[in-house]
Image (cartoon, grey):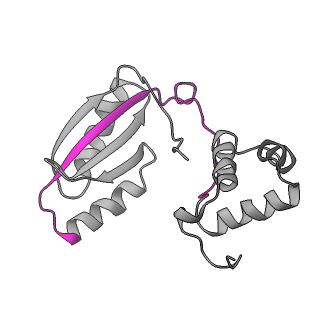
Amino acid sequence: MNDPDSPRSERELDKIDRRILRVLQADGRISNLKLAEEVHLSPTAVLERVKRLHRDGYVLGYEARLNPAKLGAGLLVFVEILLDRTVHDVMDIFKAAVQVRPEILEAHLVAGGFDYLLKTRVADMAAYREFIGSVIWTLPGVRETRTYVVMEEVKNSSLLPV
């Protein structure tokens, strides 16, 4: 028998835990009662499982998905960043600098021909020209960039296969 207070590894998630995660991922605002109906458990049992899934780090949080075009951020741009040097101090300063820029939605250290891949959103191409000059090129350690403007979002999902 598993200790209910001990952390569970991913291998130990049962079918009901996975079903709960799928439902929460699709609708984070679902009521506990409706969630219980969806997974065929009592509301009390579901609430305890959801609390455990939070405590064990399977659920990181909840957020509303907003329409970027309606909020003045309709242009999606990916930017490859090549740093001058890939030493820890330059990388740490760069990482700290991208954290404070709201236009930078994601920043990933990658293996390959460049160092970071940034996902950014701005209003339009004029705003991007301003952003690349006043923000990206002023980030610490930036030696080279490549820009990829998204013409059409074919798929945009944060849903994980559970």
Vertical relation: 71 (above or below) 56: above
Give how far across and how far down residue 128 sits, in percent. Answer: 33, 32
Q: Quadrant of the N terminus?
A: bottom right
Please name whichever residue, 151 or 69, is drawn nearer the observer in this view of the structure: 151
Give how far across and how far down residue 20 sits, in percent. Answer: 69, 50
Residue drawn at x 53%, y 30% as measured from the top left:
68
Q: Is residue 43 left or right of residue 29?
A: right
Residue at the far top in the pictured view: 151
Q: Is residue 83 magenta?
A: yes
Please name whichever residue, 150 or 16, is drawn nearer the observer in this view of the structure: 16
Magenta stretch bounds = 59-88
Please name whichever residue, 136 or 36, is drawn nearer the observer in this view of the structure: 36
Residue drawn at x 40%, y 47% as measured from the top left:
106
Q: Is residue 13 left or right of residue 154?
A: right
Residue drawn at x 60%, y 37% as measured from the top left:
65
Give how far across and how far down residue 50 sits, in percent. Answer: 73, 59
Quadrant for residue 67, please give it: top right
Q: Is residue 86 magenta?
A: yes
Vertical relation: 62 (above or below) 120: below
Q: How many marks?
A: 0
Residue drawn at x 42%, y 23% as measured from the top left:
154
Give how far across and how far down residue 143 sits, in percent. Answer: 13, 50
